[in-house]
Image (cartoon, rainbow, N blue to C red):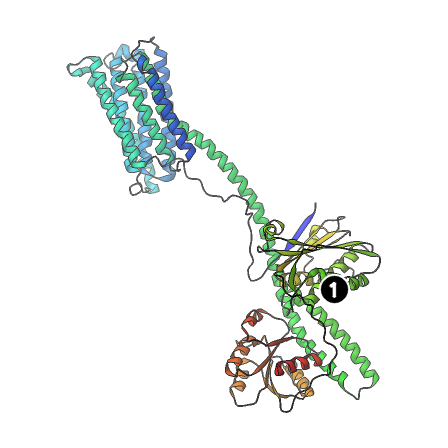
Amino acid sequence: MMTVYAVDFRSENIKVDLNPTARPLTAPPLLSTAPTRRVDRIAALSVVLISLLAFLIILPRAAMPSPRLVSFNLANDTGLTLIYMITGMLLAGQFIQLRALSLAVLASGYIFAALVTIAHLMTSAAIFQKNWPNAASPETAGAIFMLWHGIFPVFAIAYAVLSQAGRDRPIARKSIPSAIAIGAGVAIGLTIISTLAAVWLTAQRFGVTDAEFRQAMAMIAWIISVAALLIVYSQTRARRFLDMWLCVALSAWLLDILASELVGHGLYHFGWYAGRIYGILAAAVVLSALLLETGALYARLNQALADMQTQGAALSQSEAALRQAQKMEAIGQLTGGIAHDFNNLLTVIIGSLDMLRQAPDGNPRTVRLTDYAMQAAVRGETLTKQLLAFSRRQILNPVVIDPNRLIRDFDALMRRAIGAAVKIVLDLADDVGSTRIDPAQFEAALLNLAVNARDAMNNAGTITIRTRRIASAEIALDNPELPRGPYVLVTVGDTGIGMDSETLARVFEPFFTTKPTGKGSGLGLSQVYGFATGSHGAVTIESAPGSGTTVRLYLPEVAAEEEAVAQADPAQPIPLAKAGEIVLVVEDDPGVLNMAIETLDELGYGVLTAANGPEALQAIRSDARIDLLFSDIVMPEGMNGVELAQEAARIRPALKILLTSGYTAQALADTRTLPDGIEIIPKPYRLDELAQKLRAAIDG
């Protein structure tokens, strides 16, 4: 498997991306409070319309006598009991979770319906009809039916009124057992009262026939049910899942009463059987909807679990990336600090060697030894530049340039550096555009990659360097870590032995190398990393054992501008100071300060010194002649060189300023606010470089 290692960690803003393609996990609401969806509303309306259509079809036949099926009545009541009881238990469970009194009331209503259905069923039992003929009779069963159909809608009305947002506040958890006990007690009490009331009403008759009595009670129950439907809908607007299906249940409830009693002729007529079927529909519609939605909920939970597992895997990867970012940042801070201090030492060493080389009375042996020391110091300077490039604390000199041009111009030197046994193939696209980079750092990155590729191929193989343009719309797919925009992609691939994942995870660390001792500094790829991120781009590396390695440099494309490569100026005489010119040197390192004094004295300048910003400001506010402020950027006492330059320019607008630093550090982020024309010279600097900068700054 090919492993890809990507680095684009900016210490100022480390971001972790947790699988943006995964759906956000949101806790689904309970079924009783879930909002209705369009598909739910269509389903509910379809049930109501089909029920009405069926009622219109059976209406002409409602009064037709039908066979007496006692078993149908028994099965109907048994089924209703189970349906009501299960629905009541589900709603009680929802109440325990939400602690809403409206749910407790509705659950109590369904429990009452289950219990009163049992009482209705018992009136058909032969043992009760034999021993209590007045209590267990078809007339009593009819009265129980009407009371049952008149009382349950009252529970629905109470539910609708209590379910309003201002009234349905959750009760205390400790009150839940009491509420359940009260609800069960109400259901049982109403069942007993309804049964006794049915027996009493059947015995009284009030001077009317059985048919007239049943019609009167049916009309009362129907009116109460109509009122319940209107109140439930007006109070809830059927916005919630439970409210909508409760309205559907009450609609079927009305058709039950109409078909079985008001348009039918009582027991065992066609309308009576149809009414019982509507009764089953009224009882089952809420339970069915709850069960179907429960199945859908389980499906959503499974999907949520899958999403959670995906996000968990992404989180693990992101945590690993964050740890890597933190490690790279810590290493960068350490190496940057070391390189800065080392540059201060090299400033003293190189400055001293430069002046020794300028001495006219030097004997050949002294000159030779001085040259050896200078070569070692220059090598040390190169190493510190690599460290600073990795930590992105090096002062870069970016220009807008065509990378193809740089690669072609550097091709010959690169071929000589890696040897004739390694083949280099250039595949450069014509439309890559320009990018703003430091040409020297770009060439150093290419050379580091080529040397590493050569070593991975044991000095025999092919290195392929490609360029292509990545449009803004493509970058999110190609490298989502980067900000949107067009990029120039430079790819360096080899046919070498490749790397395993453990090695790949550390390749950008300074001093990490798989080469034998003395065969490499371990700073090559860290320099590539520093160059890419310092150029506001990124670098990725892809490799696997036996499959070679491919490194991709992403460099932001810039608008077409005049392209130029800084050309080295021809050798010029070292410019000296003009009569009476004074330089104020601000440096907190005593060794560097002494070296600067010696160098300026060698060039003929008068020197004033300060160890920090406040001391320098005292001199600037005085009447002393100061032709140029020469200050380190990173200093103590709460004022860096950038801030000092800004204040100095305010006090003495005509004062010339030259800044220096062993690395840019955070202070250089403020250089864009400096007055125009201020130059920066990196440490370590040579005598001739400093002389040129001083002269250019004073004369500029």
Q: Residue at x 59, y 86 (%)?
A: 627
Please indicate, yes or no, whether residue 341 appears anywhere in the rendered image: yes
Residue at 84 percent across and 57 percent down: it is 421
Residue 167: x, y in percent? 29, 41
Considering depth in this image, is 288 or 418 the residue closer to the camera? 418
- 153 relative position to 657: left or right: left
Element under disc 1:
loop
Provide the residue designation for mark 1.
521
Q: Where 56 falls versus 584 (above or below)?
A: above
The part of the image, by quadrant, that contains residue 263 is: top left
* Residue 415 image offset from top left, x and y in percent: 80, 61
Q: Is residue 11 left or right of residue 463?
A: left
Q: Would you place residue 621 above or below residue 65 in this image?
A: below
Disc 1 marks a residue whose amino acid type is: Ser
Q: Quadrant of the C terminus?
A: bottom right
Q: Is residue 671 left or right of residue 128?
A: right
Q: Is residue 419 above or below residue 249?
A: below
Where residue 387 sits, quadrant-wise, is bottom right
| Location of residue 72 (image quadrant) | top left
Q: Residue at x 31, y 13 (%)?
A: 60
Q: Residue furthest left?
A: 207
